[in-house]
Each structure stands twice: as C-alpha cells, then as structure tokens.
Amino acid sequence: MSDTPRQVLQSIFGYPDFRGHQEDIINHSLSGRDALVLMPTGGGKSLCYQIPALCMEGTTVVISPLIALMQNQVDALQALEIPSAALNSNCPPEEQAQIFSALKEGRIKLLYIAPERLSAPGFIDFLTTLNISLFAIDEAHCVSHWGHDFRPEYLKLEQLKERFPRVPRLALTATADERTEKDIIQRLGLQYGAVFRSSFDRPNIAYYVSSKSNPMTQLVGFIKSKHSGEAGIVYCMSRKRVETITAKLCELGFDALPYHAGLTSTERSRNQSHFLKEEGVIMVATIAFGMGIDKPNVRFVAHLDLPKNMEAYYQETGRAGRDGLPANVWMIYGQQDIVRTRMLLSENPSYEQRIQDLQKFDALLGYCEELTCRRQILLSYFNEHSEPCGNCDNCLTPPDIQDVTTDVQLALSGIYRTGQRFGAGHIINVLIGNESDKVVECGHDQLPLFSKGKHRSRSEWQLIIRSLLARNLIHQDLEGYGALSLKEECRPYLKGEVKFSIRIEDKKSGKARVSPKILENGDDQKLFDELKRVRLELAREADVPPYIIFFDRTLLEMVHKKPDTVSALSNISGIGATKQEKYGPQFLEAIGNFIAKQTVD
C-alpha cells in the first residue's frame, strides 16, 4: 500500500492520532529492523504490527499463544474488510486449504498462527515461498524461563532469524521484569534491535487489597455495590473453587460462567464466546482464562486467591478497563493462601527456578501488605517511578498504622515457647488466655506468656500472624496440623531490634470505592444504553462481540457529540471509512429518534 501509517490509522481504524511510542515502533518496523516492545495491556500493541502490515507488500505473520486472541483480532480486522486469517487446530481441513490457497495468491495481509504451527512438517518451508513482510511475536515473555508463563514451543522461534534473515521481527509483551526482558532479547536474537518501553501505569484502574474473611460474601458485596450488571472476571486457584463460586453467583441471579482446564474444549469455547458476545457476563476462572482476551469493557477483575507473582497479577488485572474507562481490581487473601502458594512453588525441582519463584511471590506479598500507595509499589517492581496515585485503597482511605513490635515479639515467643509444633489457632488461644482442652493438656496455660495477649482480639492476632508469614519471618507446615516455626530472619524482630508496623483495623474488606460514573446526566445514560442495544443487535446479526462494532468510548463520544450526518461520524474516534458506511446509518437513526422523543416529552 502507498498510504502512510497516519493515513491508515485515520482512514481505516478511525483514530485521530497515535498514542505513546506507536508511531516510532511502526516506522522502525517499516525500516526493516527488529524491536522489543514493552507496552501495558490496552496500550495499543496490535496497531504496532497491523498498520505496518497494511503499509507493506506481502503478508505479516502474527505468532500468538491462544486461539481466542487470534479469532478476536481476525474478527476485528475482517469487520474493517482487511484480508486476514487464523490457522489453528479449530480450522476444519476445508478452511485450512482455502487459507493456504489465499496465502499462495498473496490475498492475506495478516496471518495468525500458534507457535506450534512452525513445528508442523513443511510449514516453515511453505512460508519461505511467500512474501513475508513482518513477524510479530505476541506475548513474547513466553519465551523466557524467568517469565511467568514460559512455553517451551516459543524457544523454536529463534529459527526465524536464520530462515528469514531479511524479515523484521517485532516481539511484544505487557509483562516483563528486567531479567525476563534480557532473556527475550537473547533467545530471539534481538540484540541489534531497539527496545521500546512504555509506562506500565494504568491510571484508570483503581487497586484494592483486603483480608479474606468470608470470600463469597465479600465478593457478592463488591459486585452488587460497585459493578451490578457489568462484565468482570473472578480468578480462583482451583477448578473446584471455580465451579463452587460460579454456582453460587448463578443462584444469586448473576450471569456467571466457569472456565478452567478441566472443562472440555467445546465448553471452554462456548463459555468464552458468551462472555465476549454478551453484556454483563461474569467469568469465574483459573489462570487458564484470559491471555489475549480483547474484551475492552471488563469493568472489574477480582482475585479470591493470590497469584504467584507480580507479573501474573499485573497481566490478570490488566484485563480490566482496556478501553481506558474507570475500572476496579480487587483482591482478598489470607494466611492459608500464603502457605499453600509457598509450598507449591517450593516443589519446583530446579533450585534456581525455585528461589526465583519464591522471591517473586515475596514481592507480591510485599505489595499486599503495603501500607502506602499500591501503584508506587506495583510500578517500582517494573523499575518505574510514580507519585502517590490517589486511586488505590491506601491513598483513598489511608490505613490506621500501628506499631505492633511488642505484639510481634509476643507472637514469636508464643511459637517458640510451645515447641514450634502447633498451628495458629493454638498459639492464639495461649496468647489470649483461652483454656482450651489442648492448651490445658499441653500445660501451656502455665507458660509465663499465657493470656499476655488478651488486649487483642482473635482476628487481630490472626492478622499479625498472617503478616509474619507474608514477610517470611515464620514458616507453616501444611502437612499435619499446620505447625508454625521460626525462621532465622525473625531474630531481630524477636529481640525488638527492628520495628514492625501493621494495619490492624482491616475494615475495608469488599468496600472498593465506586468508580467515577461514566455519565452523570440521566438522559445521556439513556442514550448510551440505547446505542449499546443497537450495537448488541448488530453484533448478534454478525455473530461477533459487540466491541467489534464499536468500543464503549466511541459510543460515549456519540452521546456527547450527537452527530446527525454520516460525515459528522468521521470526527468520532474509532469510526473509520468502512464502519462509517457499514454501521453509521443505524446509529444516526437511533440518535435522531432519541432526540426527537426527548423533544416531544
């Protein structure tokens, strides 16, 4: 094509200008050079390879790990009448034959494949017969052993440099710490390419972390008060927990669906399709769900169990508010979460990997226990500085911070004096002076520290013990009775040489602040709802997700500007020439009818 990147952006995609490093990345690829792109979820990574694909002769090959991502992007491109296709295991033989034929004839601009496809007999040789303009490697952190989602098949991508030495490669990821970034560059042979780093900050997302007490009650309270009727994702650690939470949400009238590896591929595909194509659906899932999901109007992400590291947390929470509109991410955690995850990570046979995993988990726990701005801690993990954000629980409602150094000494002494053979419940009974059968039987009611902690409630002692576990000062053995024992790191705290502060009154559980209303005016809200209804009807007719028609941001701009002609639609972000012609009349009619009705009323 002879159009410039800016012309393609405006005429086809309908956006007035580039964001961040997009234009620099595109021009870099057009010059035939490699690059690594680190850009947050929702930052516009896909345009960084889609626009070069339309500006160059030949076919751009996009390597993506999930079928869902491929199909989402192919649907969106085809809605813009851009020749594109996905080769994956879901394609029947007839469709695959048609795609291969179209590739030979040069009729496909973007081809999406899984990394496994490159290992298929003869496929690389077939690609060498085509005019390949660019390789885009999405979710590039999967190539690194240090990344949070390593996939062995990604290691085979290094052959692209040898087989296609003149074709530029663009590696993209939303989550990579410094070690993972270096590993991506080395394994893919990008040493002579450029690195484009965008800010990891997602200012539209509000972050909340609370203690776990009654998970189901907390979750329902959060959803009902803040996100009634809105789409969201709830992450759980186990398949059984996913099924249980889904069933309870459905009993309460929510449109909720499960997603985990124990379901058949047909069930997973059906549930995912419903989530993408309908409004207000809640997906309850393990981490098996989400990578590459493009649904832009997910208004909340909730974690009922701890992720394994900050990268996973960042990527999973990044699925909220991809459209840039306000969204909440909310997480609750407790003592057992910490112990179970540490035990799971400790089972890795590789010593180096095990240490790395535990260090990353400790960084996540530090974020959870943080008493100051959460966004500062999150961004600092990715080597980025931030001022206090004003949009997290600690900024919005500063916690009541108390020095509990003396109580920590008492708790550590309780663990030691009882022989480091008992669980938290027993230790707390001793501290608060509860003469339980076991306490009396063991003679622990005769210890000097018996009842020395009665000034605190059981829940406060549970919080202190959880904090000791989170800061890796004590160990809990999950086998047997969950015995607590001291770690060497606790010594300066036991001696009172280091202060220990904590949030004692954890009253914010489930009380995330209401996200700012997208529309304050009641009539504007009614028009927005009407435009969403029109969009849903068109999406169902085309059997595509509603956002393929228009993003919520585009509908909101229609509400504010109320265009009355087809040409006026061209001034609204997200409406290119194709969509203007295809969908413009239906939305103009809806706006006109609404205004006419308001005038009569």
Image: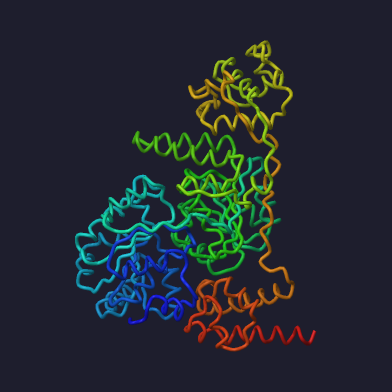
Q: Nearer the viewer, residue 579 or 273?
A: 579
Snapshot quadrant of residue 419? top right
Q: Nearer the viewer, residue 46 or 99?
A: 46
Residue at horizontal 49 percent and vertical 23 percent from the top: 487
Left or right of 197, for residue 499: right
Q: Is residue 220 above or below residue 416?
A: below
Left or right of 589, for residue 152: left
Q: Nearer the viewer, residue 175 or 418?
A: 175
Snapshot quadrant of residue 5? bottom left
Q: Is residue 487 above or below residue 348?
A: above
Quadrant (top left/top right/bottom left/bottom right) for the N terminus:
bottom left
The colour scheme used to paint the residues is rainbow
Q: Nearer the viewer, residue 431 or 367?
A: 367
Q: Is residue 365 above or below residue 472?
A: below
Residue 508 in the image: state x and y as whole percent: 69, 44
Residue 26 in the image: state x and y as whole percent: 37, 69
Residue 42 in the image: state x and y as whole percent: 49, 62
**View extreme (right): residue:** 601
Quadrant (top left/top right/bottom left/bottom right) for the C terminus:
bottom right
Left or right of 542, for residue 536: right
Residue at horizontal 26 percent and vertical 57 percent from the top: 192
Figure disc tally: 0
Snapshot quadrant of residue 31? bottom left
Q: Is residue 466 above or below residue 545?
A: above
